[in-house]
Amino acid sequence: MILNFTIRMAVLLLVLLSSLSMSACNRPNFDPKLAMPPYPYELHTTNVIPIQVFRDGTHIEIVNSTDNSWSDLTVWINQRFAAKLSQLPAGQRVSMNLFDFRDDLGEQFRAGGLLRTRPAAKVELVELQSGLEQPLVGLISVMPGKGQ
């Protein structure tokens, strides 16, 4: 009788912990305090500069193959998510964590990773903005081929 009660309590505790952990995982990943400005559609251009962007798991690598250095940048992904980048030196490579990118509501970019609960979002359009009222310029987003 005592053993039966103990098993029931253990099962109840397991169900309770499982439901709590599942609800925690499905919680929206946003924080309004970390919101970025909305995407400036009026500043969008079709200009592209020879700076390549490679996705490496939950990071992007930005390779500045130009002879221009950039500073105080906003990097935009998919016309929605943005993150600040202090320096992009000429001829250098910079790594950015995709979890640092936020939209105008504070929602975090779905970067993926080991414990993800939703599929990772694709990095399709990457743009740089060098000032608040400056036009955006596109970067060359290098998509991995099959088998990579």
Image: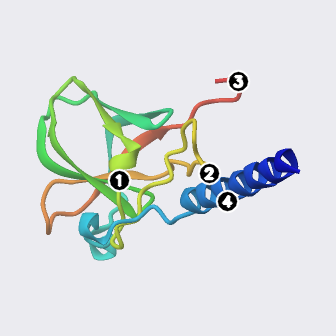
Q: Give the Cα separation between the discs numbered 3 and 4.
A: 41 Å
> Which residue is found at the position 53% from the left and 64% from the top?
27
Q: Amino acid at mark 1?
A: Phe
Residue type (three-letter) at the residue carrying disc 3 = Gly
**Numbered mark located on residue 116 in the image:** none
Identify the disc placed on residue 101: 1
Which comes sooner in the sequence, label 3 or label 4?
4
Residue to which mark 2 is pinned: 117
Between disc 2 and disc 4, the foreground one is 4
Mark 2 element type: loop
Please give the residue where the numbered disc 3 appears in the rendered image. Answer: 147
Front of the two marks 3 and 2: 2
Q: Residue 148 at what x, y percent from top left?
A: 64, 24
User: In front here: 101 or 10?
Assistant: 10
Give the amino acid type for the residue marked by disc 4 in the picture: Leu
Q: Earlier in the sequence, mark 1 or mark 4?
A: 4
Question: Which badge, 3 or 2, is on the more N-terminal residue?
Answer: 2
Pick whichever of labels 2 and 1 is earlier in the sequence.
1
Give neighbour class at mark 3: few <14, some 14-19, many 20+ (Cα, 10 Å).
few
Image position of 101 with respect to 57: above or below: below
Q: Residue at x 35, y 60 (%)?
A: 102
What colour scheme governs how the chains and residues are painted in the rendered image of this protein? rainbow
Give the class, few, some or many, for how many residues have Cα within 10 Å of label 2's Cα (few <14, many ≥20).
few
Disc 1 is placed on an element classified as loop
- Residue at 29% x, 76% y is 42
